[in-house]
Amino acid sequence: MAAALVLLGTVNSPNFVFSETTSKVEKIRGRIVAYSSDPACLNGNGYWSMLIRVQDRKTGTLPRFVQVQFSPPCSKHLEWLGHRPFVQKFRLRRRQDADSVLKEFYDCAPESAEKCRQLRMWRPLPGMEDEKLPFGQQVPGYRAMDLPLAPVV
């Protein structure tokens, strides 16, 4: 029974994404400034997040950042990782359940707190090393429509 439910969720997940109305898709203009990836590869997919600095046309406003989750196939090379980012348009769907306070370091397991090395969670793209990221602040969560988020089985 459990296997049938997992299979049903896996088969229906892509259909749910494609059946969404276009009014829920936001077009955001911005630049990828940093990325974070889970070192594990599950079900043939990697689980990544990118931090986008939104380019508002208004002048004098503070930079606004959004976090976007996506999961490319493990075998896919992400060309943008090695290049200086440029301003581009992203088609994103808002996920309020993915809003989170941006952490600078990965959490350590409670039993290893004394000998735990703090590992940086976010890696800047080339040319973005001096970008001030909003660590400790709430960042809105999104899902990329052009970079799907694979279900974890």
Image (cartoon, grey):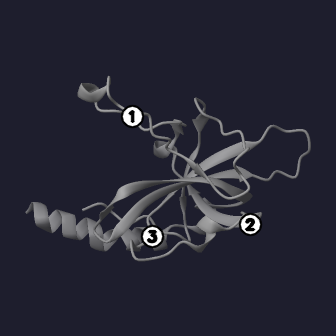
**How busy is the neighbourhood of tag 3: few (under 14 within 10 Å), some, or many (20 plus)?**
some
Q: Seen in the image, is 59 located left or right of residue 108?
A: right
Residue 96 point in image, percent of width and height: 51, 44
Give whichever of discs 1 and 3 has the lower sequence position. 3
Q: Seen in the image, is 2 located left or right of residue 63?
A: left
**How busy is the neighbourhood of tag 1: few (under 14 within 10 Å), some, or many (20 plus)?**
some
Residue 116 point in image, percent of width and height: 35, 31
Kind of residue indicated by mark 1: Asp
- Give the label, 1 or 3, closer to the camera: 1
Kind of residue indicated by mark 3: Pro
Residue 68 sits in which quadrant?
bottom right
**How busy is the neighbourhood of tag 2: few (under 14 within 10 Å), some, or many (20 plus)?**
few
Real-space Cα separation, disc 1 to disc 3, in angstroms? 24 Å
Number of numbered discs overlaid on the protein picture:
3
Would you name the residue on which mark 3 appears?
A: 72
Would you name the residue on which mark 1 appears?
A: 107
Residue 123 point in image, percent of width and height: 57, 50
Quadrant of the snapshot with the N terminus: bottom left
Q: Residue at x 50, y 41 (%)?
A: 120
Foreground pick, 7 / 47: 47
